[in-house]
Structures are given as structure tokens and as C-alpha cells.
């Protein structure tokens, strides 16, 4: 099919680009690592976002090839970072649905120069709904090898608390809609406070996403979020820019 051929060209010719968005510790403002955000720079159609790209890959039966490429590209870049920084990768529904998801990822990690212990995989609830128990098994296998897991976009959709019970999670990543209103809306702040308390009871570190103002940062810090990410401090950047940012703070 046409899409499969185009994706094959994209993989062969390096049209898949990965941007890295810095993540920081709330307490110290120190750099903690980065989230890899992939996109397809198509020579004719222009920039294709990750979601569309993965939908096309799924249709073309190329999900695994795309996942392998993005993961290995991101791990290769991260191998040159200072050794205290973590890398976060997003995991899609088609990844998790594959029976050999854990094996594929373990293989990519083994071929890289980046240790499993510094890798975080961000899972969305949407990625988990299809087969939660099957996914949980594969997630547990990767967790045993040192990979950490984050539940991404928390608060954006239907929250199924069962994920919190059965998955070996390390982080809870708040969707940016959970952060947007906390400065001006008492109810929004109350929801944030309750989630942070729950996360604390479950021994999960909270990552606040979409921090765009100092006032928001002050609030998530005061409420006890461990980490933050957002345009206030840093936008997603090219690999070389992030490497500079990581080594000498820009
Ligand atoms: O950066 P951007 O606005 O394109 O991100 C849009 C969405 O695409 C986000 O929800 C993000 O999690 C997802 N995404 C970005 N990069 C990847 C990737 O490499 N793999 C997967 N599965 N999703 C990604
Ligand atoms: O769904 P996920 O969390 O994986 O996707 C992260 C997305 O959020 C990326 O597309 C990234 O560009 C975007 N993002 C990160 N920080 C901010 C921010 O401060 N404001 C807004 N509007 N988007 C952000
Ligand atoms: Mn994410
Ligand atoms: Na998110």
C-alpha cells in the first residue's frame, strides 16, 4: 500500500524526527531529563504529528518498525546526556497491544548504550484499555529490568483506578487540563491537592505537565508535585539543542 511505502522511505531516509522536552524537579528547578516527542517531516505533506503517524503505521502494519526506530533513535541521543538525566518515551495503544511489546523494547534497550534504569515509559489510559491484564504482565517484565512507568495524561479522560492498583507505576503525570485552572479556580486546586495526596499514599511521584506560568509552578511546587514540564521553562527542542541545554544549561 502507498502508506507503507511512504513510511518505509521515511524510516530509510531519516524523516522521523524526535524532539526532546525538558522535565525539571520542582524542589530544585534542576533538570531531571526529557520526554521524547516524535514527528514525521514529510517532504510533500509537511509535518505529521505523532498521533497521525502512529495511526498510519498501524494501518500499514508498521507499528513495530516505527516504535523500534523512535525508541532506538531516542536512546541513542540520550546515551550522550549527562548520566543523571532520564529519558521518557511515549507508548501507544498499538505498541501495548502487541504480544511481544516487552521483548521488542527489551531488545531495543539491549542494543542501545542507554541503561534501562534511566528509562521511563509513559502510558496513556487509552493505550491500556484493550487488554489491561495482558499489558500489565508485559509492563511488569520491563519494570523488573529497571524501566519505570508513568501513567500519562492523568485526568484527561476516564480515570480507571484499577490501573493504579495493578500496574507497577512510578509516576503519575497530570494532564495539562488538570493544571490550567489551579491559580484562579479553587475547585481545580482542590482536585490537584486530592490527586497529589492519593499519589503520595500510593508512593507515586507526580509530574505536572503544561506549566506555562510562574504562578502555576509555585502552586504545583507548594502542593508537592515532584516534577514539572512546560513551555514556561522549555519547549520541545531538537536533539542537539537539548544536548547543549543539558550540558551547559543552554
Ligand atoms: O508533541 P505532539 O504535540 O506531537 O504530541 C502529541 C501527542 O503525540 C502526545 O499525546 C504524545 O504523547 C504523542 N507522542 C509524541 N511522540 C510520540 C511517540 O514517539 N510515540 C507515541 N506513541 N506517542 C507520541
Ligand atoms: O500527551 P503527552 O503528555 O505525551 O504530550 C505532551 C504534549 O504536550 C506535547 O505535544 C507537548 O508539546 C505539549 N506540551 C508540553 N508542555 C506544554 C505547555 O506548557 N503547554 C502546552 N499547551 N502544551 C505543552
Ligand atoms: Mn507523554
Ligand atoms: Na500528558
Image: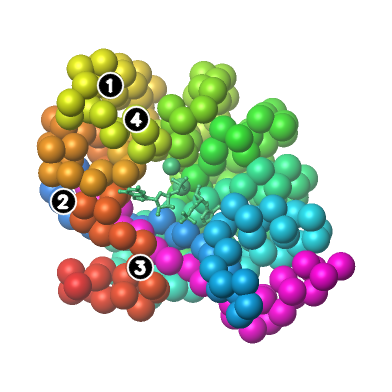
Q: Tag on residue 188? A: 1
Q: In the figure, is residue 79 to the left or right of 179?
A: right
**SS at circle 1:** helix
Label 2, on which residue?
29
Percent position of residue 103, x then y? 69, 54
Disc 3 from disc 2: Cα separation:
18 Å
What's drawn in magenta, residue-wise?
Answer: 1-25
Label 4, on which residue?
178
Disc 3 from disc 1: Cα separation:
30 Å
Disc 1 from disc 4: Cα separation:
7 Å
Position of 107 relative to 149 (above/below): below
Disc 4 from disc 2: Cα separation:
21 Å
Q: Tag on residue 237? A: 3
Of callouts 2 and 1, the N-terminal one: 2
Percent position of residue 59, x then y? 79, 55
Of callouts 3 and 1, the N-terminal one: 1
**SS at circle 3:** strand
Of callouts 4 and 2, the N-terminal one: 2
Name the residue located 26 percent from the left edge and 16 percent from the top edge: 187
Amino acid at each position: 500500500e502507498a502508506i507503507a511505502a511512504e513510511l518505509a522511505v521515511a524510516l530509510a531516509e531519516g524523516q522521523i524526527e524526535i524532539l526532546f522536552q525538558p522535565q525539571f524537579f520542582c524542589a530544585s528547578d534542576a533538570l531531571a531529563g526529557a520526554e521524547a516527542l516524535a514527528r514525521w517531516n514529510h517532504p510533500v505533506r509537511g509535518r505529521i504529528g505523532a498521533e497521525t503517524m502512529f495511526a498510519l503505521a498501524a494501518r500499514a502494519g508498521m507499528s513495530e518498525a516505527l516504535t523500534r526506530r523512535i525508541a532506538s533513535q531516542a536512546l541513542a541521543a540520550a546515551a550522550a546526556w549527562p548520566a543523571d538525566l532520564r529519558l521518557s518515551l511515549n507508548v501507544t495503544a498499538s505498541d501495548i497491544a502487541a504480544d511481544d511489546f516487552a521483548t521488542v523494547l527489551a531488545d531495543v534497550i539491549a542494543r542501545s548504550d542507554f541503561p534501562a534504569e534511566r528509562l521511563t515509559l509513559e502510558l496513556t489510559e487509552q493505550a491500556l484499555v484493550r487488554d489491561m491484564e495482558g499489558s500489565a504482565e508485559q509492563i511488569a517484565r520491563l519494570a523488573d529490568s529497571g524501566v519505570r512507568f508513568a501513567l500519562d495524561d492523568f485526568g484527561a479522560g476516564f480515570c480507571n483506578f484499577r490501573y493504579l492498583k495493578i500496574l507497577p507505576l512510578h509516576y503519575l503525570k497530570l494532564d495539562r487540563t488538570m493544571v490550567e485552572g489551579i491559580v484562579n479556580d479553587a475547585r481545580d486546586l482542590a482536585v490537584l491537592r486530592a490527586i497529589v495526596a492519593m499519589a503520595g499514599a500510593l508512593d507515586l511521584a507526580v509530574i505536572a505537565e503544561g506549566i506555562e506560568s510562574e504562578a502555576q509552578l509555585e502552586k504545583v511546587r507548594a502542593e508537592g508535585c515532584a516534577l514539572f514540564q512546560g513551555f514556561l521553562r522549555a519547549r520541545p527542542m531538537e536533539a542537539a539543542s537539548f544536548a547543549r541545554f543539558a550540558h551547559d544549561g543552554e
